[in-house]
Image (cartoon, rainbow, N blue to C red):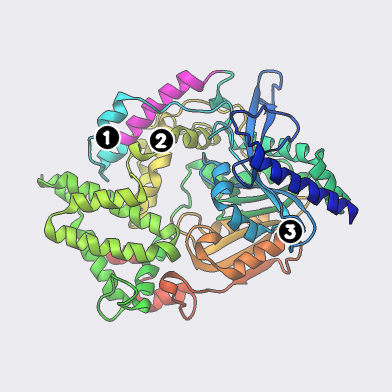
Amino acid sequence: MKARTIATAAILLGAETTRAQNCTFETISPSKDLIWCPCEDQFLCARLDVPLDYKNPELARASVPLLKLPATPDSPDGPYRGAVLVNPGGPGVSGLDLVREGGALLRAWIGSNYDIVGFDPRGVGLGEPRLNCSTNTTTLQTRDEEPHRLVDDFYQRYIDFSADLGRRCEARAGGETGAGRYMTTAVTARDMLSFVDAFASSADGGRVVEGGGNASVLNYYGISYGTFLGQTFASMFPGRVGRVALDGVVSPEGYQANGTFPGVTHLDGVLGAFFVYCHAAGPEACAYYTGETAMDIFERWRASFARLDARGAEAEGWANASEIASALLTFKVGMLTAATGPVVSFPAMAEALVGLEAALAGGELAAWTAGLNAAIGDPGVEGRVNPEQSLGVLCSDQGNRLFGTTLEGLRPFVEQVEGQSVVGETWVQQILGCSGWSIRGREVFEGPYGGETRADLLFVSNTFDPTTPIENTVNNAPKFKGARRLTIEGLGHTASATLNQCALAVVKSYFQGTMCGRDIYCPLEAGPFNVLLNGSIQENLVAAGLADISSLYK
């Protein structure tokens, strides 16, 4: 009791210091120990000092920025259990932002008796050295004036953009001490191990040991690409695995082959579910409702889609061909965006589709395109923020195998995703960028993936995830001895997109050490438009005749 009181007092004292003297990442000196200082309201910040090159530790140093949402004193979830590292996916996305913006949700999924810790991977965000080589180019300014088009011209412009970006990054950050060579997932996995070692030797690590826990293992929640990072860590350091949950599972072999496989195999199923849910919701809830069946709503959608014939318009020299092509790209990216979070996005998607009909009828297509772009973000190369930070990870992880590949050489990848979904080609942009990335990673882990880990991993998948299909869990979980599976009957990318309360409870029970069973199924709960369907999503799609909308569209 006394030790608990002292620990609580220390946390409260830290809270008072937060109000008095905050630090910033710019003022923090990197340290090999975890030295936390109050920052950003309820958070604590630190910079972990690590070798730039783990194969040559004397070469130079790097620093990993860390943002911690501390465990709640006297948590209702039980005694303090240590820290959980989190990764939001990407690759090339800030983990600091994940905790800053989603810390409360993460705490609900994991438990308030854990510290929730986000970090920026190598070369990303506030990490040092940071990869930044995409600003102030004439090429970008010129392309900003051109329309975004979903024809070969669009793909070629992206390839050209990436070649230019790759040359600049090679010049700025491709040297022995530049960021570019040390951005692979394997290096980030080693940084995670460095964090675990530093935590184990800290006072917080001592609290875990005093409570009967193990402070020398990784607790981790990885989302999307973060599941590849988690599988990499577990394969490289199986004896250092604690509670590791992988949500929205990426296939390691597929990711390293071309970044897309098996990709969007269930994207059309999610889009088909829009028509099912819209019909079930009725005209008062769904603005796009029409007719008497879900198929009637699909036919309404197909009619608008058919009018956005970019290739036909270009071939026939229509005056508004560029306008149509730009609208088609925005339309497809908008559909993909909505499919990642249908519970929240499908109502807005219904409104956007009504707006598209009006724009087509009134000749206001450009205005509709601009409005949707403002909502979902610029779908062209110009709209990407620091694309080099994503490419620096992805292309290095693939061993630069696509460097120098032309559009014709990349066409099989484009056709692969085009064949998987009516909007599938929007998923191929990132892999096109690897055609221009020449910086080779210092350390690339290529497997084998799997093994006997110290603790059981948890693989989490939705039945209809548009970008990380459930087959990735089916194929990869068995590679890790004793791995557990959670299958969620639901739509969207990762468990959080479903808002499934059963899933939340299961994930939390896993982190709290009370999970029962090795293969758990969470049934369908209320989805888009707050509709609860009878039966599974697949059963509803089949009943509506919408199980394969690609075949219906052709």
- Give, as a single range, the part of the protein colored magenta: 157-175
Question: Is residue 349 toward the left or the right of residue 467 in the image?
Answer: left
When asked about the image quadrant of residue 355, the answer is: bottom left
Measure how far apart labels 1 and 2 are at the Cα level: 18 Å
Q: Is residue 193 above or below residue 277?
A: above
Q: Do the residues labelled 1 and 3 touch (CB within 8 Å)?
A: no
Measure how far apart labels 2 and 3 are at the Cα level: 37 Å
Question: Is residue 63 toward the left or the right of residue 172 in the image?
Answer: right
Q: Which of marks 2 and 3 is nearer the N terminus?
A: 2
Q: Nearer the viewer, mark 1 or mark 3?
A: 1
Q: Residues within 10 Å of mark 2 (few under 14, many from 20)?
A: many
Which amino acid, mark 3?
A: Gly
Q: Are marks 2 and 3 in contact (CB under 8 Å)?
A: no
Q: Name the residue under label 2.
A: 433
Q: Would you say the magenta stretch is mainly helix, strand or loop?
A: helix
For the point 30% across and 79% down, which residue is it? Answer: 293
Which amino acid, mark 1?
A: Asp
Q: Earlier in the sequence, mark 1 or mark 3?
A: 1
For the point 69% across and 59% down, which residue is it? Answer: 111
Q: Name the residue under label 3.
A: 482
Q: Position of residue 415 (x, y in %)?
A: 35, 48
Measure how far apart labels 1 and 3 are at the Cα level: 51 Å
Q: Residue 144 carries which label?
A: 1
